[in-house]
Amino acid sequence: VEPYQLPNRGPYPYNKPKLNTVPFTPTQTKAILSGMQPGLTMVVGPPGTGKTDVAVQIISNLYHNFPDQRTLIVTHSNQALNQIFEKIMVLDIEERHLLRLGHGEEELETDKDFSRYGRVNFILQQRQELLNEVQRLQDSINVGGDFSYTCETAGHFFLYQIVARWEAYMSKIKSSKLAEDIAKLFPFKKYFENAPQPVFQGKSYEEDLDVAEGCFRHIKKIFRQLEEYRPVELLNRGRDRVNYLLVKEARIIAMTCTHAALRRTQLVKLGFKYDNVLMEEAGQILEVETFIPLMLQNPLDGHER
């Protein structure tokens, strides 16, 4: 058995994944494993025994191991919701996939706005920053044209200019198998000049190849995010953008039971769907209230999801 090694994400310091800092006990580890399996998992214990940390780790594991699934977090109070949300923000979960519904987000101990319209503004701002990176990448490889104008034009630029150069580069270095060729022939050397230098250490072929692949993952992530932001770019109304964010973009959605009850009709009408439900401090929630978050989806083939 070998430990799983995370792939290289890029040469910048912020590319390094945020590591878990909580040392879990064997019992907590069993609870985390159980929470990742289909079915019901109940975590019970007195205050201060790490129940919230276990819940947050389960959410993080589901987020990374099942990228197509969405998780709904439900609590009885805004205070409990903010507490679990603040711990989620510290983990290696992308900010664009987090959404906090209802009142109480102003009590979060952060200057970031995780409300619906706050997330839309964040996406629009990040879209512009990514398009600026596309322009810088375009200048670094001396390609003319206005490819950084929209997400669509950036996608064409990636397909016809970036991927073509990368495939030609990989073909050359795999045939030569020389460590010095990796740095010498690298097509995006100028783009990564603002990264900590030297990007390539030149110690071995395998290490430098891993760095080169990490650089390409960094570039590919830029265009993958722009592709996800394209619908927000096409939608003009703020409400349509908010609904798209709620139904499609966000992967971890948090709300209170009260908000779920008030917005149930609206959420069902939008086609809101999720795959996992986490109820924090379930002992404070009435039995009848636990059914409300489970009824936020339309039936599928006559069966409740």
Image (spheres, helix red, strand yellow):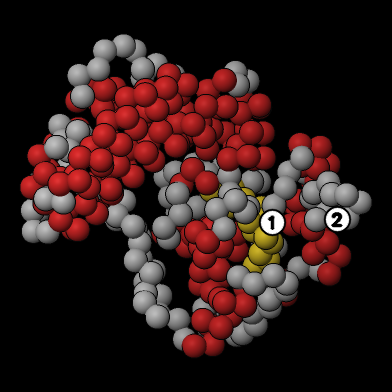
Q: 116 or 54: which is nearer to us?
A: 54
Q: What amino acid does circle 2 point to?
A: Glu
Q: Which residue is mark 1?
A: 275
Residue 254 in sight: no
Circle 2 SS class: loop
Residue 196 placement (x, y as % from top left): 13, 47
Write down the quadrant of residue 30 in the picture: bottom right
Residue 265 placement (x, y as % from top left): 83, 41
Residue 167 placement (x, y as % from top left): 30, 36
Give the vertical position of 41 relative to 118 (above or below). Answer: below
Q: Quadrant of the N terminus?
A: bottom left
Residue sitting at x 69%, y 70%: 38
Q: Which residue is mark 2?
A: 304
Q: What amino acid does circle 1 point to?
A: Asp
Label 2 and label 1: CA atoms lie apart by: 12 Å
Write down the quadrant of residue 127 in the picture: top left
Residue sitting at x 52%, y 34%: 228
Residue 123 placement (x, y as % from top left): 48, 33
Circle 1 SS class: loop
